């Protein structure tokens, strides 16, 4: 029978360092078997909420719902293979297995290290997307109700809502479109994520540039997703869903970092749209199926977690690999879902305002996930290690010059989108080096619940919440009015206090704050000169080695105006006469002006091969980009269509010269 300590005994394991006002340390021994200590980032006000939860747990002697969040942070520290520490972020609150707002990393080289579905959550790749516009508040206020209703009409919301984006369970082999790889089948969406939207014409080519992982996890395997999960997800593509998911029209209220805001195309008074949704029933079923499979895996591997909700499997086990492949497919579905909602948002704005989305400049600022596990490389004890980082209710926030963020944000860091609650503001943060070192490049994802849903329903009324929103000139459209109280601002922590704690501790710098104008809800924004090199590309297959090494490239330069995906775009094309049509050529040169007038293709990363094209199958090799780096000069990336991911190699920065490489190399290097 479990023994329970009094609150004062439990509190003795929690302490602050003398010089720290934002970190509550969890000493090993708080729960049996902790391999590493815990850290929870909270200020005094947030600490009080955390301790109240622990006090209630001690008083009830373990009876009730989830364990207190601080207990769950300690429980995660007992899992095999964990490194560093178990981290709780300022918006932390109790969840299934892991607390929501919990971050933990596991060493992939450790054969005992595990992956746990509880560390990702049931709504896999639940995340936030921010669209900007060229509209001002005064442009939308006169049409506030009309626009709110149009969004409500266009975007399915609520439990059981069904999407309007056509999608089949399988492609038809006798269909001509199948041969082109453009069939509207669910497996394709699960495998290629945002690229599926591009092929179907529901997204702009540039959208994926500003998505985490470029809107596609390459490790996805649709065959690992059960038929039941697919049936649940099939009708839900392009739907908001239930809970705290929302589509919210916001106005940038305050800018804290003018340079960062300019880089993201944001300014005070600007109208933006924030979308919060995830993988819907498909992700939930993937997690449910994995938990069942891992019960067997734990018996085989002799894993006995301290909490049965921490069901897990060795990372390298069949069950672990199957879950990671299915989780990646569900993550791709979530990016498709948010991308489809973005399409519907653009259509609604176009209808009400009488202008095309292109004319309204409805560009994606960024799309982040806050429920996911990913393989990443971090410094551990002075050496780079491959880690499986679990982020549950936590947002990735990479620092400036990190190779995994878009070229446009190299000088400012990755945007981290922090959604508020109904009637409160949201924030855009920027990643920092300190956050990379201290929290595995993670920050908060929102306000975090302060009251349970039952407590909110019992203490708040729909009428009171609606009256307060009306006083704030906020319009609300909701599928289930009786559940509005669950998502009232009083049900959550103060999002400004959460963000301030992040800013004061180690997390991203604050860039923008926005307040809502109206929202759709089931129950509701940031130097120096940057001169990227230009690329000269000719598409082809197969590829040949084509050596190049010039300080002064001999090229002809053209400025083309063309229309793609319904959007007028400018492209700079660099080419050389006599170039073999079967050669993909990278030709770079140094531009001295701060902002080059043309750019052929802006992707800077060794990302997905299909990101350069919407054709059914990309060439066997694409050279994707180059850009300056403050430490290592210029470096280049390459990817193959049949490779999951190729590692990069640094280049000498001096002369910015490049050579092509053999397309059949397993590890591509460029000199």
Image (tube, helix red, strand yellow):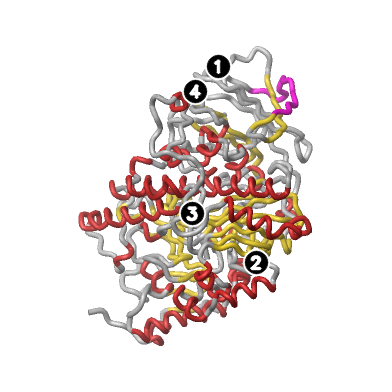
Front-most of residues 4 and 245: 245
Q: Which residue is mark 3?
A: 278
Q: Nearer the viewer, mark 1 or mark 2?
A: 2
Residue 90 visible in image: no
Residue 617 location, x and y as percent? 49, 27
Q: Quadrant of the C terminus?
A: top right
* Among the two numbered marks 1 and 2 on one chain, the one whose residue lies closer to the N terminus: 2
* Among the two numbered marks 4 and 1 on one chain, the one whose residue lies closer to the N terminus: 1
Task: Please tell me the numbered disc located at residue 662.
Answer: 4
How many angstroms separate mark 1 from mark 3 (CA)? 41 Å
- Label 1: which secondary element: loop
The reply to whether dot 2 and dot 4 touch (C-beta < 8 Å) is: no
Q: Is residue 353 left or right of residue 183?
A: right
Q: Which residue is mark 2?
A: 425
Q: Quadrant of the N terminus?
A: bottom left
The segment highlighted magenta reads 549-562
Q: Nearer the viewer, mark 4 or mark 1?
A: 1
* Among the two numbered marks 4 and 3 on one chain, the one whose residue lies closer to the N terminus: 3
Q: Is residue 251 left or right of residue 121?
A: right
How many angstroms separate mark 3 from mark 2 (CA)? 21 Å
How many angstroms separate mark 1 from mark 2 (CA)? 53 Å
Q: In which image quadrant can residue 19 be found?
A: bottom right
């Amino acid at each position: 029978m479990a023994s329970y300590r009094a609150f004062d005994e439990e509190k003795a394991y929690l302490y602050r360092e003398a010089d720290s006002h934002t970190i509550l340390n969890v000493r090993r021994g708080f729960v049996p078997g902790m391999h590493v200590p815990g850290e929870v980032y909270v200020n005094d006000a947030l600490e009080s909420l955390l301790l109240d939860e622990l006090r209630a747990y001690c008083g009830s002697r373990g009876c009730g719902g989830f364990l207190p969040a601080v207990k769950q942070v300690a429980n995660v520290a007992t899992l095999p293979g964990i490194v560093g520490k178990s981290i709780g972020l300022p918006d932390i609150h109790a969840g299934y297995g892991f607390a929501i707002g919990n971050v933990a990393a596991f060493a992939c080289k450790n054969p005992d290290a595990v992956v746990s579905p509880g560390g990702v959550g049931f709504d896999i790749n639940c995340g936030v997307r921010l669209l900007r516009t060229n509209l001002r508040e005064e442009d939308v206020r006169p049409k506030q109700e009309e626009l709110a209703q149009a969004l409500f009409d266009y975007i399915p919301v609520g439990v059981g809502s069904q999407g309007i984006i056509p999608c089949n369970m399988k492609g038809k082999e006798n269909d001509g479109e199948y041969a082109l790889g453009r069939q509207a089948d669910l497996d394709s969406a699960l495998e290629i994520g945002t690229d599926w939207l591009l092929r179907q014409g529901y997204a702009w080519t540039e959208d994926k540039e500003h998505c985490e992982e470029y809107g596609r996890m390459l490790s996805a395997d649709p065959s690992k997703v059960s038929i039941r999960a697919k049936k649940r997800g099939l009708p839900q593509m392009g739907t908001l869903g239930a809970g705290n998911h929302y589509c919210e029209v916001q106005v940038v209220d305050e800018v804290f970092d003018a340079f960062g805001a300019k880089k993201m195309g944001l300014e005070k008074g600007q109208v933006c749209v924030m979308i919060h949704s995830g993988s819907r029933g498909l992700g939930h079923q993937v997690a449910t199926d994995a938990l069942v499979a891992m019960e067997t895996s734990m018996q085989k591997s002799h894993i006995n977690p301290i909490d049965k909700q921490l069901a897990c499997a060795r990372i390298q086990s069949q069950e672990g690999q199957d879950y990671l492949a299915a989780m990646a497919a569900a993550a791709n579905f979530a990016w498709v879902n948010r991308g489809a909602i973005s399409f519907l948002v653009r259509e609604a704005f176009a209808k009400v305002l009488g202008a095309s989305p292109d004319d309204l400049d409805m560009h994606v600022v960024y799309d982040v996930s806050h429920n996911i596990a990913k393989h990443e490389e971090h410094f551990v004890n002075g050496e780079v290690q491959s880690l499986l980082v679990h982020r549950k209710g936590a947002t990735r926030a990479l620092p400036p010059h990190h190779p995994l963020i878009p070229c446009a944000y190299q000088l400012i860091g990755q945007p981290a989108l922090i959604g508020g609650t109904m009637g409160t503001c949201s924030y855009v943060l920027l990643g920092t080096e300190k956050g990379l070192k201290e929290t595995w490049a993670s920050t908060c994802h929102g306000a975090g619940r302060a009251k349970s849903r039952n407590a909110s329903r019992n203490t708040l009324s729909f009428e009171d919440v609606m009256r307060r929103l009306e006083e704030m000139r906020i319009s609300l459209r909701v599928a289930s009015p009786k559940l509005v109280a669950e998502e009232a601002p009083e049900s959550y922590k103060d999002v400004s206090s959460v963000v301030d704690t992040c800013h004061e501790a180690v997390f991203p710098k604050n860039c923008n704050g926005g307040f809502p104008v109206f929202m759709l809800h089931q129950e509701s924004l940031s130097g120096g000169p940057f001169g990227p090199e230009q690329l000269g590309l000719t598409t082809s297959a197969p590829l040949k080695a084509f050596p190049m090494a010039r300080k002064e490239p001999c090229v002809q330069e053209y400025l083309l105006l063309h229309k793609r995906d319904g959007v007028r775009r400018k492209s700079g094309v660099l080419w050389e006469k006599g170039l073999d049509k079967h050669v993909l050529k990278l030709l770079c040169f140094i531009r001295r002006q701060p902002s080059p007038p043309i750019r052929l293709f802006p992707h800077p990363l060794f990302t997905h091969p299909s990101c350069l094209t919407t054709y059914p199958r990309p060439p066997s090799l694409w050279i994707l980009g180059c850009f300056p780096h403050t430490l290592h000069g210029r470096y280049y990336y390459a990817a193959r269509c049949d490779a999951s991911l190729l590692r990069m190699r640094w280049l000498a920065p001096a002369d910015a010269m490049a050579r092509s490489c053999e397309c059949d190399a397993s590890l591509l290097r460029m000199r």
